[in-house]
Image: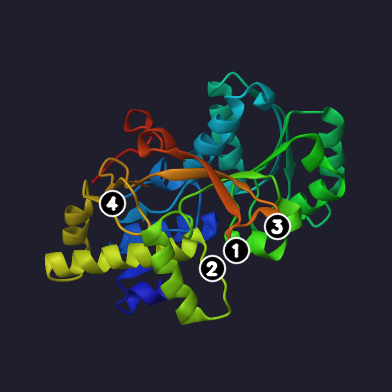
Amino acid sequence: REFFDGGGDLALDLTNSGTALAVSAVGKEKHKLVIVTGGGSSALTGANCDKYTYHYAYDTYALAHSTGTNIAAQKNGKTWYAIYPTYAFGTQMLADFTEAVKSQGGSIVKADGAPLGTTDFSSYVLAAKNAKPQVLGIFSAGADMVNTAKAAAQFGLNKDMKVAIGLLFLADVDALPDVFTGSRITTSWYWDEDAASRGWADKWTKAYGGGIRPTDVQAADYSATMQYLNAIKATGGTDPDKIVSYLDGRKFKDFYVHNGQWRARDHSVVHDMYVGDILAKDKLKAPHAWFNIVETIPPSRAFRPESQSVCTKDW
């Protein structure tokens, strides 16, 4: 509120879903633009959609309907045990994965909810191990996701079943590669995906030093910012209504987005998504090249179809 009241024009990133939903509400009230690249809840373009908020990088629906359908389409991917956090992101991720797995004839046989900030996931993981599902779904993010994956690896679940992680960043794998080896994930972008991605990643790595590679959210932040600046240039100013009119329905492509469109119906920015496996250390082609992309999901399959949108468009 202070930022917008002080003349701020755009809120960007908003990695926590609860924060993203709260800032979106303030943006709607004050007629200020919000572009969410980090928060994942698909409610941002569903029940909580509004004129001034766009969801840019990924959402729980796209993550679930890419990873979930990819795995559940296989014979050994039908029965799932889910561990999820009991807050906005986790409950929405569970709902979207349940729908995706069911669409391929599979089922989540048990969903175990853990409070945000749980540190010991051994009881959750052991319950999953005893249930003997074909797939372990880890639907948390951040420290909760890391701690769940650590416990799963400690008790050997990554050897007994396929591990599907709803949201995983390259930086997580850099920190704990052995924990995530073999896990299947979906990402909105990968630095080693093609020449354009590698070119931008090289510039990013040079600028920030340390030899590390950018995550998809860092790439999305840059891409979304450039799209916004281009809209300012095209409309001749920062008037949010003019920028919304310019962006709505616009198709585009850059180093981050392929087959992209600013969808006017619900303000979901749709594009290709990438399903991949985490490689073992001895399989890397280059440092930090952890992802082996196994399927590219076009926007028509990755994102919620407009015909199924629950966004009550009031603008």
Label 1: element kind: loop
Frontmost residue, 204 versus 125: 204
Residue kind at label 4, given as amino acid type: Lys
Q: Is residue 239 visible from the viewing direction of this image?
A: no
Reading the chain from its start, which is encountered first: label 4 or label 2?
Answer: 4
Callout 4 touching callout 3 (CB < 8 Å): no
Q: Residues within 10 Å of mark 1 (few under 14, many from 20)?
A: some
Residue kind at label 1, given as amino acid type: His
Reading the chain from its start, which is encountered first: label 4 or label 1?
Answer: 4
Callout 2 touching callout 1 (CB < 8 Å): yes
Q: Where 179 sits versus 229, above or below? A: above
Question: Would you name the residue on which mark 4 appears?
Answer: 51
> Image quadrant for the N terminus?
bottom left
Reading the chain from its start, which is encountered first: label 1 or label 3?
Answer: 3
Which label sits in the foreground, 3 or 2?
A: 3
Reading the chain from its start, which is encountered first: label 3 or label 2?
Answer: 2
Residue kind at label 2, given as amino acid type: Arg
Question: Would you name the residue on which mark 1 appears?
Answer: 288
Question: Would you name the residue on which mark 3 appears?
Answer: 281
Frontmost residue, 165 versus 93: 165
Residue at 19% x, 68% y is 232
Residue at 60% x, 65% y is 287
Reading the chain from its start, which is encountered first: label 2 or label 1?
Answer: 2
Which label sits in the foreground, 4 or 1?
A: 1
Q: Is residue 197 visible from the viewing direction of this image?
A: yes
Judged left or right of residue 141, residue 148 is right
Q: Residues within 10 Å of mark 3 (few under 14, many from 20)?
A: some
Tag on residue 213?
Answer: 2
Label 2: element kind: loop
Callout 4 touching callout 1 (CB < 8 Å): no
